[in-house]
Amino acid sequence: MSNQQVLRATRTAPGRAPQQTELNRVCAAAGCETRLSRYNKRQFCYSHWPTVLPVQRGVEKKIAA
Ligand SMILES: [Zn+2]
């Protein structure tokens, strides 16, 4: 009685490898020596990356004091 089932692993599809940048890059901000991830395409570390705030729409309500 051959009721045994064999599970065989399949190879993962050959996909695109994640983009990598140069190794050992350092944040471009002056005095910052944070090493950037090789997957980080930016020139700054997370703390020095300029934050872009979305445009605020609408009118602010004035609160009467
Ligand atoms: Zn930095």
Image: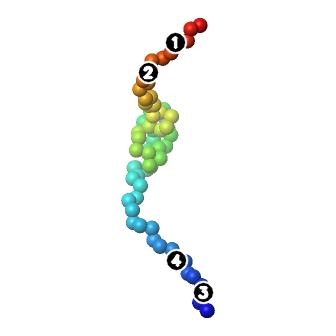
- Which mark is first along the chain, 4 or 2? 4
Give the label on residue 58, or none: 2
- Which mark is first along the chain, 2 or 3? 3
Query: How busy is the neighbourhood of tag 1: few (under 14 within 10 Å), some, or many (20 plus)?
Result: few
The residue indicated by pointer 3 is 3
> How far from the left and from the top, in percent, is residue 5?
57, 82
> Amino acid under label 1?
Lys
Q: Which secondary structure lies at badge 1?
A: loop
- Disc 4 versus disc 3: distance between alpha carbons? 16 Å
Give the label on residue 12, or none: none
| Residue 52 seen in the current view | yes
Query: How busy is the neighbourhood of tag 3: few (under 14 within 10 Å), some, or many (20 plus)?
Result: few
Q: Is residue 34 left or right of residue 20?
A: right
- Disc 4 versus disc 1: distance between alpha carbons? 67 Å
Quadrant in which the N terminus is drawn: bottom right
Q: Are marks 2 and 4 in contact (CB under 8 Å)?
A: no
Q: Nearer the viewer, residue 9 or 2?
A: 2
> How far from the left and from the top, in percent, is residue 32?
49, 35
> How far from the left and from the top, in percent, is residue 31?
48, 32
Q: Nearer the viewer, residue 3 or 39?
A: 3
Q: Which secondary structure lies at badge 3?
A: loop
Q: Are marks 4 and 1 in contact (CB under 8 Å)?
A: no
Which numbered disc, 4 or 3, marks the residue closer to the eye? Answer: 3
Which numbered disc, 2 or 4, marks the residue closer to the eye? Answer: 2
The residue indicated by pointer 1 is 62
- Disc 3 versus disc 2: distance between alpha carbons? 68 Å
Give the label on residue 8, or none: 4
Q: Which secondary structure lies at badge 2?
A: loop
Q: Nearer the viewer, residue 37 or 58?
A: 58
> Amino acid under label 2?
Gly
| Residue 32 seen in the current view | no
- Disc 2 versus disc 4: distance between alpha carbons? 59 Å
